[in-house]
Amino acid sequence: MKVLVTGGAGYLGSITAKALERAGHTPVVLDSFLSGPRGYVGDRIAYEGDIADRHLLGRVVAEHPDLEATIHMAARIVVPESVEQPYEYYRDNVAKSLEMFDALTALGKPRIIFSSTASLYALTPQFEVTEEDPVDPTSPYARTKRMMEMMLEDLAKATSLRAIILRYFNPIGADPDLETGYHLRDATHVVPLMAQAALGQREAFTLTGTDHPTRDGTGIRDYIHVWDLAKAHVRAVEEFDNVLAKVGAPYTYLNLGGGDGVTVRELLAAVERVVGRPIPVVEAPARPGDAAGAYANADKAAELLGWRTELSLDEAIASALAWGEKRQDVLGYP
């Protein structure tokens, strides 16, 4: 199948494009290159532009009338930045996605696989969340994702648009060939920051938030190897119609994760175990918008997609560290 991947030059988008290729499909990339490196596209079919550009979307569909679905990954994703720049986040994530959803539906391309976030779940005493649990997004970033979900719900009820909404937790690691990986110049996500500290690229890892209501006071998350996550998106494309037929609805939500929670201190211990030495740590207050966290019950994805994680936390960490050593050669910065 031929699949449009918005944000296909990004960290997740480029690796998902590779997973599509490995499964015999053809990705068509649409990216503004606001943050995704051009080199991540490789020799794939690619269009530079805005997801809200209806003329461009029309040209993409005209040139690729056999597009079967769209994986929507294009988004601003940095939580602290969303607190500082809410306008840019609501404009780029919400308003532009609405234009794209409407345009694709009008063009006869109504199948949407949406990469959402599990950071919008409300805090629960057990920290494990299912798709039916209440949501309470705590940052502008998470609220934009929830708004996009609500738009998809309403559009799916009123139009031919159909949606599988994937809520996932913290992807880590790089693609299997170490050709692409986490690319933000100023890392904001926990494993790249730990990797930089472990590799001596920064003086210490700053552990933000030590008074959360978790077993050791640090945030709890469900870390997932990015390659497992990419393969889940491929399965969502392949099983799209079957999934919605099984649930008997024009849209559905699926959690993606390993099914077990790891605190930041436990993650730090795992990184130290993989590298074989301690990592210098500085403790600091939680960042604006940070939540205590959660981890996924992914039984529904197993049932409907036939998907579960295959790669271990240690394998994901080893992949992230290997990418940390290589990324300067690829990107030109550590």
Image (cartoon, helix red, strand yellow):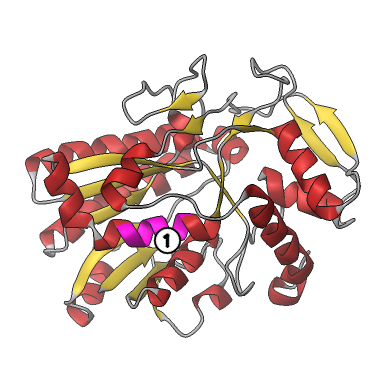
Residue 73 coordinates in the image, percent (x, y): 41, 55
Q: Amino acid at mark 1?
A: Lys
Viewer-proximal residue, 252 or 84? Answer: 252
Span of residues in magenta: 229-235
Quarter occupied by the C terminus: bottom right
Residue 187 seen in render: no
Q: State the SS at label 1.
A: helix
Q: Residue furthest bottom?
A: 43
In-image side of 166 versus 68 (left or right): right
* Residue 75 in view of the camera: yes
On whether residue 58 falls in the magenta region, the answer is no
When asked about the image quadrant of residue 79, the answer is top right
Relative to the observer, which residue lies in front, 174 or 306?
A: 306
Q: Is residue 280 left or right of residue 219?
A: right
Which residue has dot 1 on it?
231
Q: Is residue 234 magenta?
A: yes
| Point 64% across, 72% down: residue | 178
Task: Classify 42 as above or below 256.
Answer: below
Question: What is the quadrant of residue 100 in the picture?
Answer: bottom left
The front one of 153 and 244 is: 244
Left or right position of 151 against 90: left
Q: Residue at x 54, y 38 (%)?
A: 82
Specify the quadrant of the image occupied by residue 20. Answer: bottom left
> Tag 1: Cα neighbours inside 10 Å, few (<14), some, or many (≥20)?
many
